[in-house]
Amino acid sequence: MEVEEFNKKIEKIKEDAVKNILSHFNRINDKLFTFNNILIGGYFALSRIYDDINIKVIMIPLINLIFLIFLEYLMMEKSRKEASVDELGLDEFIKFAKNKETRPTLFSLLAIISTLSVFGYFVYLLIF
């Protein structure tokens, strides 16, 4: 009896952990969206303040914004598949199960790296 209760608790912990990963991804992504919007304004201001910086530089944070929106779309599709997991075929279910836990972490890491790159280039333009 105790072993069954222990296994149930372990499964509950795992389930909560997956939910927490998605929650953290959403919070991080919201902050990255906000920061990227600030960078859009910053790039626009730089292009107006310094004559040697072309207005087309505004495309850099806009491309990152598109990337962040794309990541949100992928996460929405992931949630949609989770909602209909009982309708997946065996091959699709195996593929889905393998990617279930690593994708949010990878997406979050890619979003952070891309936004930091946009920020790094902004600082480079500001200093040099």
Image: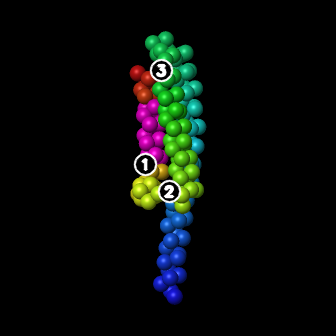
Q: Position of residue 35 (x, y in %)?
A: 55, 36
| Closer to viewer: mark 3 or mark 1 | 1
Q: Nearer the viewer, mark 2 or mark 3?
A: 2
Magenta segment, prevailing SS (helix, strand or loop): helix
Location of residue 74 with respect to 59 vertically, above or below: below
| Residue 108 x %, y % | 47, 46
The label on residue 88 is 2
In the rendered structure, does residue 65 fall within the stretch colored magenta?
A: no
How would you rate the neighbour count of disc 1 (Cα within 10 Å): few for under 14, some for 14-19, many for 20 or more? few
Residue sticking out furthest to the bottom:
1
Question: Badge 3 is on which residue?
Answer: 57
Disc on the earlier residue, 2 or 3: 3
Q: Which residue is at a point 41% across and 21% down the rendered structure image?
A: 128
- C-beta proximity under 8 Å, tags 3 and 1: no
Question: What's the residue type where badge 3 is placed?
Answer: Val
Horizontal side of 83 relative to 116 (left or right) equals right
**How many discs mark residues in the rendered view?**
3
Give, as a three-letter code, the residue at label 2: Leu
The label nearer to you, 2 versus 1, is 2
Residue 28: tell me if it is visible: no
Whether residue 91 sits left or right of residue 45 in the image: it is left
Q: Residues within 10 Å of mark 2 (few under 14, many from 20)?
A: few
The magenta-colored residue range is 106-120
First in residue order: circle 2 vs circle 1: 2
Residue marked by disc 1 = 106
